[in-house]
Amino acid sequence: MLHSLYIKNFALIQELTIEFSPGLTIITGETGAGKSILIGALNLVLGERASSDLVRSGTTKAIIEAVLTNVHSEKIDALLQSANSEQSSELILRRELSSSGQSRCFINDTPCTATLLKQAGEELIDLHGQHEHQLLLHAERHETLLDDFALTATEVANYTATRSALHELQQQLKTLKKDAATIREKKEILDFQLNELNSVSLIPGDEVAIETEITLLENAETLFTLSNTLNELLYDNEHSAYSTVTAALHTLEKLVAIDKRFELHLEETRTATSIIDELARFTRSYASGIEFNATRLDTLREQQLQIQRLCKKYERTYAELIELKKELEAKSALEENLGEELSRLEQQITQRNVELSKHAAALSLKRKAAAKRLERSIQEQLAELGIPHAIFIVSITHEEHSAGDITIEGKRFTAYPRGYDNIEFLITTNPGEKPRPLIKVASGGEISRVMLAMKSALAESAKLPILIFDEIDTGISGRVAESVGKSLRKLSRLHQIIAITHLPHIAAMGDVHLGVKKSVQQERSVTEVTALDAESRLHAIASLISGEQISASSLALAKELVNGIRD
């Protein structure tokens, strides 16, 4: 719901806040009072192009701010997320326009682009004026409107999920064929590289192991000499460490027998004796196991040299060479199993094509049945709204395509994101004229009434935005005006409606009545908007009947119109 609209320094408006209510809000005022300014302000806060000429003369900045409540939806939440704006119970759209021509946009006080502001505005407020900011004039929205009426959410979800899965399989097949073609073209190179890498044992950790073994073999003689020297120092010598520590141990045992304070050191000496003995045994074993193998050393050096050459050639580390080998093996396996993999994917694609065609046919069938009901409903509504000879057509066509993903009765068709239907609303309002696309309907008043008929038909099923009608009464009067008013009032029981009108029959239907008035204050024109009480409302409606000179009869008729309302 549009809760309030704040406007400051915009055209003739100095500063005002308009609060709105649920139901039907009527706005009236004399020609030139500033009703179009309100629409202009709304357009601006909905992201339309701005002009510095709109900033009130003598001021530096115009501000328009719309506060909306109960508007959260999946799309709105996504827009808030893209704007890095926090979600709250209210949604605040704000536009600031400087006299220098610069424009700033905000959603919930977070700066955003005019495009983002417009996307949010179009989702929330459907404003029907003398321009093309109208839902029905966008042919791409006709499909969504029909689906809302036909309640096809389940069928659309089934179709889109299957189409997404099909496209994923098709992409896999495309990638596979591309990779396979590349592999075939470079098969000789691939085989050569793989053979070259297989000529060397590439095992994780081997590079370090080879280098370690080469170091040991190169230093075998030194290691043998040093280990024998260490063994002699530790054990195989008259004055070895073991002999010396053993003698010290015997002396400590005698001291402990006299003074227990040596007992701790006695245990430490015994430990030292064990350590020396263990080290000596390890040294003897190590020395006996030293390998003097020149052939093995040459083999390892050659293997190390091959690895270094490969690393340099492929400009990769040893670990990266292992990964390259895995990649080449995978490509080789792909080429060997290509036929089987291609066949598997093609079978899955064929199966998905069949599923997609079934979902598309079921969705189209449901749409066609709903289209007939929608056509009758809108034509009946239009007759009541003063367009008795209207013919409304929901055109559903399909595009044949030799490579289409959908097959119906042996023919192939293009698969669109939401089915294989091309949907567009056609209309003629004159007898004998061929129905044409709705966008080509010339009369603004007719477009508004067609929209009103559409909204009435969709009221219970569609998630419609806030509806604002400007000049919906163009070219009508009397009984038709009363029918339009009743239709607006009925629709407002399901959706918030704001209507600017010049007709008393429509004005009398409002739940809330706002009066727009222009006055001169401090030698400057100022537009003001006031919520009218019961008496003021009657005078406003009476002025629509008789003009500025309100008569007793016009007041009586105004009262009769208001009292005659029945929901």
Image (cartoon, helix red, strand yellow):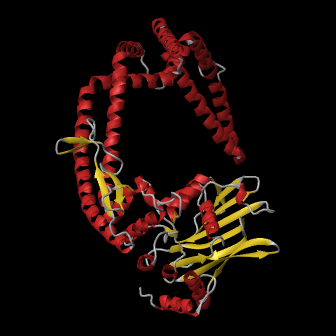
Q: Position of residue 4 (x, y in %)?
A: 62, 73
The answer to whether residue 278 is above or below residue 430 is: above
Camera-side residue of 62 and 446: 446
146 sits left or right of 486 in the view: left
Q: Position of residue 121 (x, y in %)?
A: 55, 61
Would residue 463 be seen by someone viewing this image from the given angle? no
Please report the residue visible at 65 percent of the width from the left and 25 percent of the height from the top: 241
Camera-side residue of 239 and 411: 411
Camera-side residue of 525 and 41: 525
Camera-side residue of 121 and 135: 135
Please report the residue visible at 67 percent of the width from the left and 65 percent of the height from the top: 64
Q: Position of residue 550 (x, y in %)?
A: 61, 87
The answer to whether residue 308 is above or below residue 402 is: above
Q: Position of residue 245 (x, y in %)?
A: 66, 30
455 sits left or right of 534 in the view: left
Please report the residue visible at 28 percent of the width from the left and 67 percent of the height from the top: 376
How many numbered circles are shown? 0
Q: Quadrant of the C terminus?
A: bottom left
Please report the residue visible at 72 percent of the width from the left and 47 percent of the height from the top: 261
269 sits left or right of 165 in the view: right
Would residue 121 be seen by someone viewing this image from the given angle? yes
The answer to whether residue 272 is above or below residue 520 is: above
